[in-house]
Every structure is written in structure tokens, then in C-alpha cells.
Image (cartoon, rainbow, N blue to C red):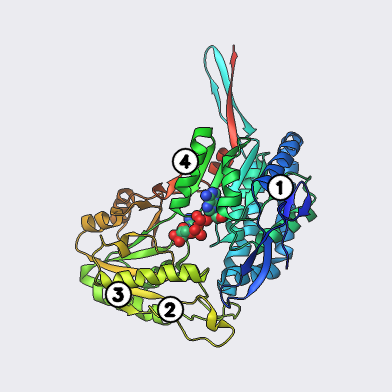
């Protein structure tokens, strides 16, 4: 399979003629090639987007919303093929691709079609003036997405960007180009005017960086690692671009003794290991009130050991492969560090022995580590793999201090049956999002994003529409 860029309505190779290999992380086998694009490809895509932008901005909102719905229909019609592509590219279980990634991508387009139809702006009436806010498209926007939820996160940005009348240049992760390429086919079949949606494949340094640096790209929405986010911010800041940065996390799961403990243990396991622990929201630090520590920790270990690790294409598999051998090596490096730091591995930590062709895949058993101080590197750095640490706490105050003792601040999950405690702890943790007695329960209208090193800005519902538009105040003297 040779993938192509979509520029100005045409499927084209990289101008250099170079390509990159794309691998299935479950087998290590090559499954496709993708264009190894560079600045010349980005320039062509931005030029096409600039040409298309005035007429796209003039398309009525109702019609733009109808385009989004047509894209949603196209994705829904291809749902099972898309789920297979996502699993092939990421190594995630097919049950997850088909129940989470693909349905959510469809929903993102439908949701923003509805959101833009019902969007409204402010008016301020004074004795001598009437002010109203006009929302205008930004122009050309750049969207850079990671490998952990490829189609889900790309659609989360593309839908509101198009809804608000912008033209798009998207740069998906070079590790997972397959569903992005499929989205190009769906968008083309939906009849979107040429140049409105452009997609350029390639690496971060070669293709992502020129997109961020391009002076005519007026906004960048980026999801990825914190170090890359810092680099994106450094490049974009002197150009005064709008920036949305959804970065990493080291999210705490706080389990209080008054919680429904079996539900809390099951919730903590799901939060730690969904998508092999490769979700920015994953709860990789599990804090348990001391009076129930052993009981809850042992339930977590039992539930973790029961998780089925294996062939991602097989129904019933709960953990597939990590994204790449390099990433597996990084995660294993943290396991070595955990041992040095005095941690006890209660389960996992090793690689399952799977039959060919999976023998060379990037698999790792889900791992629970006890006995580490909550301040050590293993317990404070983002590992982004199936590794969770467990820590006891004595008081609410101590739990909050541990929760806040990292550079990240994306989300937290609080398990308690005490309503007052739920409110108190939710208000005291420094994160952009808190779930109480649940995790990853998403209402697409709510603000999504983090504080501290987890990023900048909010997406979701009206926040996405606001990010992907400029506002102009118009003041009329009465
Ligand atoms: O992501 P990168 P990586 C975290 C996780 C992971 C670490 C590194 O801890 O181990 O980040 O992962 C593009 N200019 N998350 O290196 O590099 C890149 O091509 C512009 C958390 O794989 O951040 C890809 O499209 N773009 C995260 C995208 O940035 C650049 C999800 C993300 O890749 C670029 C993924 C540059 N200089 C990793 N360099 C989350 N928040 O969920 C790279 N890119």
C-alpha cells in the first residue's frame, strides 16, 4: 500500500519522491509506505488552502454542517475496514478500534455539525451603544496529531476547524498514517471543494515543523508529547499564532476507603491500561487510602493479571502491542529504573510469549509496581505504557499533595462515596479535568485540556469553535 498526500484535491507523492515505511507493531512487518514530505509539500498545501479559503468561508453554515455529516456517513459506512486499519497501524485491540476509535471519529463529525448549527455569539446593549460579536474564520489552520488515537484525534480537530470556515493542513503521526489516508478518501467522496482539506504525511521535523513555522498558517492545534509541544510553542510564539496544545499526563487515580472498592479497583485498572496505557488521560499513579491499601492493591493486581494480552486482531484481546519497538524499549527502560528506585513489580513487567507472526511484536504485560516513593522518577514521569505505580496515603491532604506533586495536570479520577469529599478533592487537584467514580466518561460539550505541563487551551464543544475562529467586536453608536 503506497499512501499519498492530499493537496488541492489531488493525491500526490512527496515532491522529493521519498517515502517512509509504516509498520504493524504487532508483527514488525511493513504494511505501507507514506510520503516523506518536507517544506515544499507543506508550502503547496498551504497555498492550496489559502486559495480555497475565501469561498469556503462564504459557504453557509448549514451547508458546511451538511458536509460534516456526509463525512460522518462516509466514515460510518467504512467503519469495520477503518477499525482494522487502526488496529493494524497501532497494535490496539480490534474491540477498542471498533467500539471507541471509529465510532468516536464518526461522532466527532456529527457532533460539530450540530454544534456549529446552534452556535451563537454575544450582544451587549448599553445606553449609548450596541455591541455584538462577529465570529470569523481564522484562515488556514495546521493540525498535528499523534499515534495513540489517530483517527479519533484527527477528526476531533478537523471537524470544528472546517465547521468554522477554515481550510486545513493536517499532519498525522508518521507512525500511524493509515486511517488519515482513509479519511482523505472519505472527505474527497463527500465532495468537499478542493483545497479545503489538505493532508501531508511525514515526520515531525521534516513536515510538522515547516507547518508550525509557516507564516500564513494562523493557528496550530497540536496533540502529542510535552517536549514536542514545547518546541511547537517556541516556533509559533514569535509568529503570534493561536495555539492549542494537548500534551502529556501523569494522572492520579485517588481511591478513598469509603468508595465502592471493587468498582474503584476495576476503574483503576481500566484507567491504567486502556490502549496499553497509551492515552494522555491514563491513570498511571494509583493512590489508595492506607486503611484499605492491601485489599485494593491486591484486587488491582488480580484484575490486571486477568487482562488478555495478545493478537490485536482477535476479538476478546484486551491489550495489544505498544506503538513501536522504540517505544517498548523506552517503557522497559522505566521498568529497569523502577527496580533501581526500589520498586517491587507485583505483576507483569515481562513480555508474553506469542506465536509467530506476533513473536516480534512490541508486547508487554500490564505491570503494577509497589513500594516506590511518590516523588521518584518512575512515579512522576510520563511512561505512556502499561505501567502503573500504587502508593498509600493517610489523609485527604496527603492524597492531594501526592496528586499535585508532578509537572503534569491533565486529569484525575476520584473514587469516594462521600459527596463533600468528592467536591473538596476535585477542587483541590491541579488538573484540567476530574472524574468522580468513573474515568474517561466523555460529554463532547465540556472543556477538554490540561494545566501545567499538560498543555494550553481547551477544546470541546463551544471551546473548539472558539479556538478555530477569531472574534470581532462591532460597536454601533445608538
Ligand atoms: O510524540 P510526538 P512521540 C507522549 C508520550 C510519548 C511521548 C513522545 O509520553 O512517549 O509523548 O511520543 C509531530 N514539529 N505522547 O515522540 O513527537 C509528530 O510527527 C511539529 C502523549 O511519538 O509529540 C506527530 O505527528 N510536529 C500524547 C506529533 O507531533 C512535530 C500522544 C506527535 O508526536 C515535531 C503521543 C516538530 N518538531 C505521545 N516533532 C498525548 N497527549 O496523548 C514531532 N512532531
Disc on the earlier residue, 4 or 3: 4
The number of numbered discs placed on residues in the rendered structure image is 4
Disc on the earlier residue, 3 or 1: 1
Disc on the earlier residue, 1 or 2: 1
Select label 4 or label 1 by which is in front.
4
Closer-to-camera residue (386/202): 202
Residues at circles 4 and 3 in contact by the CB criterion of under 8 Å: no
Residues at circles 3 and 1 in contact by the CB criterion of under 8 Å: no
Look at mark 2 in the image and give the residue it sits on.
365
Neighbour class for label 4 at 10 Å: few (<14), some, many (≥20)?
few
Give the CA distance from mark 4 to mark 3.
42 Å
| Residue at point 53%, 68% (across, down) | 323
Q: Which element carries disc 1, helix, strand or loop?
A: strand
Give the CA distance from mark 4 to mark 1.
26 Å
Q: Is mark 4 within 8 Å of ligand 1?
A: no
Checking the image for residue 234, the label placed there is 4
**Image quarter in which the N terminus is found:** bottom right
Using the image, determine if residue 351 lies above or below residue 409: below
Residue 151 in picture, x, y percent from top left: 62, 59
Q: Is mark 2 within 8 Å of ligand 1?
A: no
Checking the image for residue 197, the label placed there is 1
Question: Where is residue 180, by image quadrant?
Answer: bottom right
Residue 370 in picture, x, y percent from top left: 27, 73
Residues at circles 1 and 2 in contact by the CB criterion of under 8 Å: no
Residue 41 in picture, x, y percent from top left: 69, 48
Amino acid at each position: 500500500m503506497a499512501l499519498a498526500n492530499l493537496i488541492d484535491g489531488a493525491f500526490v507523492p512527496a515532491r522529493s519522491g521519498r517515502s517512509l515505511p509504516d509498520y504493524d507493531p504487532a508483527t514488525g512487518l511493513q504494511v505501507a509506505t507514506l510520503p516523506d514530505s518536507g517544506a515544499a509539500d507543506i508550502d503547496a498545501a498551504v497555498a492550496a488552502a489559502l486559495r480555497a479559503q475565501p469561498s469556503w468561508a462564504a459557504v453557509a453554515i448549514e451547508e458546511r454542517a451538511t458536509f460534516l455529516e456526509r463525512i460522518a456517513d462516509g466514515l460510518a459506512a467504512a467503519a469495520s475496514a477503518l477499525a482494522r486499519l487502526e488496529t493494524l497501524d497501532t497494535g490496539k485491540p480490534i474491540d477498542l478500534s471498533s467500539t471507541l476509535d471509529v465510532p468516536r471519529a464518526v461522532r466527532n463529525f456529527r457532533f460539530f455539525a450540530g454544534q456549529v448549527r446552534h452556535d451563537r455569539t454575544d450582544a451587549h446593549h448599553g445606553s449609548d451603544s450596541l455591541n455584538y460579536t462577529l465570529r470569523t474564520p481564522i484562515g488556514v489552520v495546521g493540525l498535528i496529531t499523534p499515534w495513540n488515537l489517530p483517527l479519533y484525534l484527527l477528526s476531533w480537530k478537523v471537524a470544528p476547524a472546517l465547521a468554522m470556515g477554515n481550510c486545513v493542513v493536517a499532519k498525522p503521526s508518521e507512525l500511524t498514517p493509515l486511517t488519515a489516508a482513509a479519511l482523505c478518501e472519505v472527505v474527497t467522496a463527500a465532495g468537499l471543494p478542493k483545497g479545503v482539506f489538505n493532508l501531508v504525511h511525514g515526520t515531525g521535523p521534516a513536515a510538522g515543523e515547516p507547518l508550525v513555522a509557516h507564516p500564513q498558517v494562523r493557528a496550530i492545534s497540536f496533540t502529542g508529547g510535552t517536549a514536542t509541544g514545547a518546541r511547537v510553542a517556541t516556533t509559533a510564539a514569535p509568529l503570534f499564532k493561536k495555539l492549542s496544545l494537548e500534551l502529556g499526563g501523569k494522572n492520579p487515580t485517588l481511591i478513598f476507603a469509603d468508595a465502592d472498592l471493587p468498582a474503584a479497583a476495576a476503574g483503576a485498572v481500566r484507567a491504567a491500561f486502556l490502549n496499553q496505557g497509551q492515552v494522555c488521560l491514563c491513570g498511571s499513579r494509583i493512590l489508595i487510602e492506607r486503611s484499605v491499601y492491601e485489599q485494593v492493591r491486591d484486587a488491582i493486581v488480580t484484575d490486571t493479571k486477568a487482562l488478555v494480552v495478545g493478537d490485536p486482531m482477535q476479538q476478546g484481546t484486551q491489550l495489544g502491542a505498544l506503538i513501536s519497538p522504540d517505544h517498548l524499549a523506552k517503557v522497559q527502560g522505566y521498568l529497569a529504573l523502577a527496580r533501581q528506585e526500589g520498586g517491587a513489580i507485583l505483576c507483569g513487567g515481562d513480555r508474553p510469549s506469542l506465536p509467530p507472526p506476533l513473536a516480534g511484536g512490541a508486547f508487554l504485560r500490564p505491570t503494577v509496581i509497589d513500594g516506590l516513593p511518590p516523588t521518584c522518577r518512575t512515579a512522576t514521569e510520563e511512561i505512556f505504557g502499561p505501567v502503573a505505580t500504587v502508593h498509600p496515603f493517610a489523609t485527604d491532604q496527603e492524597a492531594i499533595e501526592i496528586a499535585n506533586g508532578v509537572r503534569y495536570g491533565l486529569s484525575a479520577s476520584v473514587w469516594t462515596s462521600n459527596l463533600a469529599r468528592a467536591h473538596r478533592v476535585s477542587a483541590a487537584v491541579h488538573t484540567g479535568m476530574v472524574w468522580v467514580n468513573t474515568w474517561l466518561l466523555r460529554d463532547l460539550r465540556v472543556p477538554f485540556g490540561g494545566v501545567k505541563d499538560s498543555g494550553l487551551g481547551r477544546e470541546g464543544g463551544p471551546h473548539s469553535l472558539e479556538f478555530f475562529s477569531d472574534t470581532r467586536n462591532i460597536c454601533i453608536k445608538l
